[in-house]
Image (spheres, grey):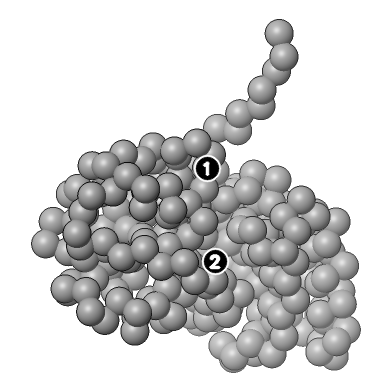
Amino acid sequence: MILSIDTATDQASVTIAENGEVIGTLTNDNQKDHAAWIQVAINNLLHQKGVAMQQLQAVAITAGPGSYTGLRVGMATAKGLCFALQIPLITINTLQVMAYAAINQLGSEASHMTPPLCYCPMIDARRMEVFTAVYDEQLQEIVAPKAMILDELSFKEALNNRSLVCFGNGSFKWKNVSRYPNVLFINEKLDIAKSLAKLATSMHLSQNFANLAYTEPVYLKEFYTYTKK
């Protein structure tokens, strides 16, 4: 029994999965409200499904990149539960979870593309910058997660003899400037909650756990706050 938490993306979610199968999910579409929503949602979901806190065997979290506030809230919540219940913490990069979801959801829409296919999640990081990475169909990294300022030559090396499927709320930025013919942009909502639960179950089976004391969110770049002079 694993509780999965995602507060890194536009739609926050809490999910309970048993033996890899999702048995319940609650979501919140108001990104500014994730902090107030998360604790109540966890309690409500456990109550709805008749699951006691003590039945949880691990807590999984999208570790980032994503919303700075969302990442801090999600990580603090997950670590607090793990400390209190003495259960392991599982952290997974948000971009990897998005790619896993896309591989499972978008394959048919990309079937006309020339193989090999690669998947490129993009999270809006303001202006022309995104958090992004590139994965192959086996979820192996082609381009490691990073913050990138987009231009018409972005991903040139990754596109060498490959087709690229781009998605996420930052992908439209590159769609406006990209000139590559072997790129497909798909605007489809991804099932992050289900994908996080599936990956977390696999990591739990292999005992791939995070260091509870020292794990921090993956920001990829420093937080910037504008100060009036």
Label whose residue precedes the other's in the sequence (2 or 1): 1
Instruction: Name which residue lies at 48% across and 42% down.
Output: 220
Work out which residue is located at the far front of the displayed protein and give it.
176
Circle 2 sits in a helix, a strand or a loop, which is it? loop
Q: Position of residue 48 (x, y in %)?
A: 85, 87
Is disc 2 surrounded by few (<14), some (14 to 19) or many (20+) residues within 10 Å? Answer: some
Is residue 119 depicted above or below 220 in this figure?
Answer: below
Which residue is identified by label 2?
209
**What amino acid type is highlighted by mark number 2?**
Phe
Q: Position of residue 65 (x, y in %)?
A: 53, 50
Is residue 18 depicted above or below 46 in this figure?
Answer: below
Q: Which quadrant of the view contains residue 25?
A: bottom right
Circle 1 sits in a helix, a strand or a loop, which is it? loop
Which residue is identified by label 1?
125
- Position of 22 compared to 115: left or right? right
Is disc 1 surrounded by few (<14), some (14 to 19) or many (20+) residues within 10 Å? Answer: some
Mark 2 against mark 1, which lies toward the viewer? Answer: 1
Pointer 2 with pointer 1, Cβ within 8 A: no
- Position of 182 compared to 204: left or right? left
**What amino acid type is highlighted by mark number 1?**
Ala
Inter-mark Cα distance, 2 to 1: 28 Å
Work out which residue is located at the far top of the displayed protein and give it.
229
Q: Quadrant of the N terminus?
A: bottom right
Instruction: Name which residue lies at 47% across and 66% down.
Output: 187
Q: Position of residue 180 (x, y in %)?
A: 21, 54
Is residue 73 depicted above or below 206 in this figure?
Answer: above
- Position of 122 compared to 161: left or right? right
Instruction: Name which residue lies at 43% across and 54% down.
Output: 171
The numbered dot on residue 74 is none
Q: Nearer the viewer, residue 210 or 2?
A: 2
Kindly tell me whether residue 167 is visible in this rendering.
yes
Kindly tell me whether residue 96 is visible in this rendering.
no
